């Protein structure tokens, strides 16, 4: 899914100057509607985000909930607190909560082996298959590389959740078990199946009956397909086509990996979710004054415990140094970190055309969530950090300017990276084979089949399970080509390189994203594509 680094590539680079916005002192600042509306508007203009919704909770109350801008460019449909957005990986905390509820009921323990509930589960290493615990599914320390296996469902694929889990055994491991942090999505598909197997309900029904209904989340849906006829207040995603023109993108549905990032919700509902989180899982009291809980206080506290340390990187630019945490790690569906001397529980979400962030400061009973319908993390970080400053009573840092400078730096780095590729290109080189010689069917052990075909004078590529991954191959140099996807919203063009044997036969096809800022979920570099029916070599 879209990382903050990769999202920078699609940022909207506006030349509009934003006026300084200085928040009044906390706690009055948190309820200053005019201030937050102004900052949302300025943030939208700086990063060209069509619409943003934000909610703030403090000390058990919703002190701000509102929207700015449009649900879709070219319309007059305004964003408000009830507008439903794809919340992507903010879903992971719901999945962790679902497992915790089942643990409260004694139906499982997070230290159970995965194979005790899914006997068919297997990783590439038999030891990992045997020793993987339910807790390990949630905390990104399996030994898989960053985003490994994401092409099984990103962009949307035709594979089922069961098929994804079956293919997991073929995805290679890159490090030792529990040795390093590497964010993944595929193991949340395993967690989804565990929940269904143990609960005897579909993942969708479990979330609806055991989380959404008790919590009163009436505007939250399990994925885009579950949006109801009455759901007319829905945000439309926007992406930079070819990194230039901001246009709408169709909704993506993760029905095959909903536990990793399928939910749609509104800041109205997520404000309630933050209240429950900050109350330790407490829903309220019944008519007799007895506590009603979503999950036990003990299980809830466990979701906020740091399990997997995450390496801390220096700030990209000096202006972002105040946001550098003193500690950083992953818990059960949550990122655990520090901000300006306070422990923060947070998560970001990235989806085609939409990004989001939620952040909680337990010591201050403070929470903020930002949902947006463009692909720029700079916008939500500007707003979230500004709210945290206000809630913590810290003199406000100019986060709008800081993240604006970071965006500019990202664009410069992207441009320089492309210049480096161009400078090393041998333009006079020719491919070893005629284009027809590269055509054929190629097989990867975990993804499946990729087909290359000659259509007219163009070499075309198509991924068997992924309708959006079709495109054209243009010769780059020697036996390397540039894959240009037909869907220009993906911003994931790749190099395709063919390895030939001594007799001119194709031995392997390798793919890798051209830009280092391409979303990590386009994990082309993990593919090991071999010819199924080797093309007959044809010498020029």
Image: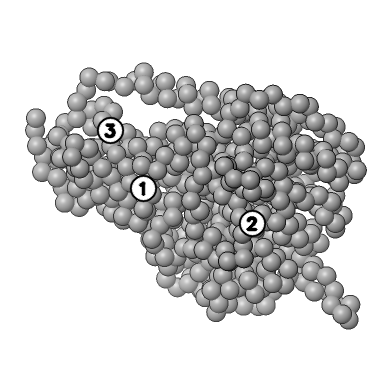
For image coordinates 50% across by 53% down, the residue present is: 251
**First in residue order: circle 2 vs circle 3:** 2
Say which of 481 and 250 sits in front. Answer: 250
* Res 384 seen here: yes
In the rendered structure, find residue 438 and report the number of the disc placed on it. Answer: none
Q: Residue 178, image x and y in percent?
A: 54, 53
Asked which quadrant contains residue 312, the reply is top right
Disc 3 is placed on an element classified as strand
Label 1 belongs to which residue? 469
Is residue 340 placed above or below 361 in the rendered structure?
above
Label 3 belongs to which residue? 474
Disc 1 is placed on an element classified as loop
* Res 317 seen here: no
**First in residue order: circle 3 vs circle 1:** 1
On screen, residue 146 versus residue 471, left or right, reads: right
* Separation (CA) of disc 1 from disc 2: 30 Å
Specify the quadrant that holds the C terminus. Answer: top left
**First in residue order: circle 1 vs circle 2:** 2
Q: How is the image coloured?
A: one colour
* Separation (CA) of disc 2 from disc 3: 42 Å
Disc 2 is placed on an element classified as loop
* Separation (CA) of disc 3 from disc 1: 16 Å
Q: Residue 92, image x and y in percent?
A: 60, 58
Label 2 belongs to which residue? 233
Label 3 crowding class (10 Å Cα cut-off): few <14, some 14-19, many 20+? some
For image coordinates 47% across by 23% down, the residue present is: 415
Q: Residue 122, image x and y in percent?
A: 42, 64
For image coordinates 61% across by 55% down, the residue present is: 234
């Amino acid at each position: 899914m879209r990382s903050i680094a990769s999202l920078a590539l699609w940022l909207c680079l506006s030349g509009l100057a934003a006026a300084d916005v200085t928040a009044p002192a906390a706690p009055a600042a948190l309820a200053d509607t005019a201030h937050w509306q102004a900052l949302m508007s300025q943030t939208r203009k700086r990063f060209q985000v069509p619409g943003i919704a934000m909610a703030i909770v403090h000390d058990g109350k919703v002190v701000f909930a509102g929207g700015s801008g449009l649900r879709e460019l070219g319309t007059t449909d305004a964003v408000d607190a009830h507008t439903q957005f794809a919340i992507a990986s903010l879903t992971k905390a719901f999945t962790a909560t679902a497992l915790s509820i089942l643990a409260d009921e004694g139906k499982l323990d997070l230290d159970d082996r995965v194979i005790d509930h899914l006997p068919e589960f297997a990783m590439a290493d038999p030891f990992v298959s045997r020793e993987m615990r339910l807790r390990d599914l949630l905390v990104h320390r399996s030994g898989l590389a960053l985003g490994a296996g994401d092409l099984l469902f990103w962009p949307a694929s035709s594979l089922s959740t069961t098929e994804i889990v079956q293919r997991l055994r073929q995805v290679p491991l890159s490090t030792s078990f529990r040795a390093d942090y590497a964010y993944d999505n595929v193991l949340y598909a395993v967690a989804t199946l565990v929940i269904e197997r143990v609960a005897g309900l579909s993942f969708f029904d479990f979330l609806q009956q055991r989380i959404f209904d008790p919590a009163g989340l009436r505007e939250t849906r399990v994925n885009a397909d579950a949006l109801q006829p009455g759901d007319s207040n829905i945000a439309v995603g926007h992406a930079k086509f070819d990194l230039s023109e901001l246009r709408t993108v169709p909704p993506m549905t993760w029905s095959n990996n909903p536990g990793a990032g399928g939910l749609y919700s509104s800041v109205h509902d997520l404000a309630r979710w933050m209240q429950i989180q900050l109350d330790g899982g407490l829903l309220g009291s019944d008519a007799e004054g007895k506590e009603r809980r979503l999950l036990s206080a003990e299980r809830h506290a466990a979701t906020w415990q740091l399990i997997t340390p995450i390496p801390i990187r220096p700030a990209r630019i000096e202006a972002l140094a105040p946001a550098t945490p003193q500690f950083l790690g992953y818990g059960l569906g949550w990122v655990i970190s520090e901000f300006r001397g306070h422990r923060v529980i947070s998560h970001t979400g990235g989806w085609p055309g939409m990004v989001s962030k939620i952040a909680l400061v337990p010591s201050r009973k403070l929470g903020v969530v930002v949902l947006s319908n463009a692909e720029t993390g700079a916008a939500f970080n500007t707003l979230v950090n500004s709210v945290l400053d206000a809630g913590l009573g810290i003199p406000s840092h100019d986060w709008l300017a800081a993240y604006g400078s970071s965006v500019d730096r990202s664009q410069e780095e992207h441009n320089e990276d492309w210049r480096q590729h161009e400078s090393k290109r041998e333009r006079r080189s020719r491919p070893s084979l005629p284009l027809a010689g590269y055509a054929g069917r190629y097989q990867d052990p975990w993804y499946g089949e990729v087909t290359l075909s000659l259509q007219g004078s163009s070499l075309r590529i198509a991924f068997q399970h992924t309708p959006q991954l079709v495109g054209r191959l243009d010769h780059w140099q020697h036996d390397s080509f540039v894959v240009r996807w037909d869907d220009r919203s993906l911003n994931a063009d790749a190099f395709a390189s063919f390895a030939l044997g001594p007799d001119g036969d194709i031995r392997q096809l390798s793919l890798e994203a051209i830009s280092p800022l391409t979303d990590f979920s386009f994990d082309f570099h993990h593919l090991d594509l071999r010819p199924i029916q080797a093309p007959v070599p044809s010498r020029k």
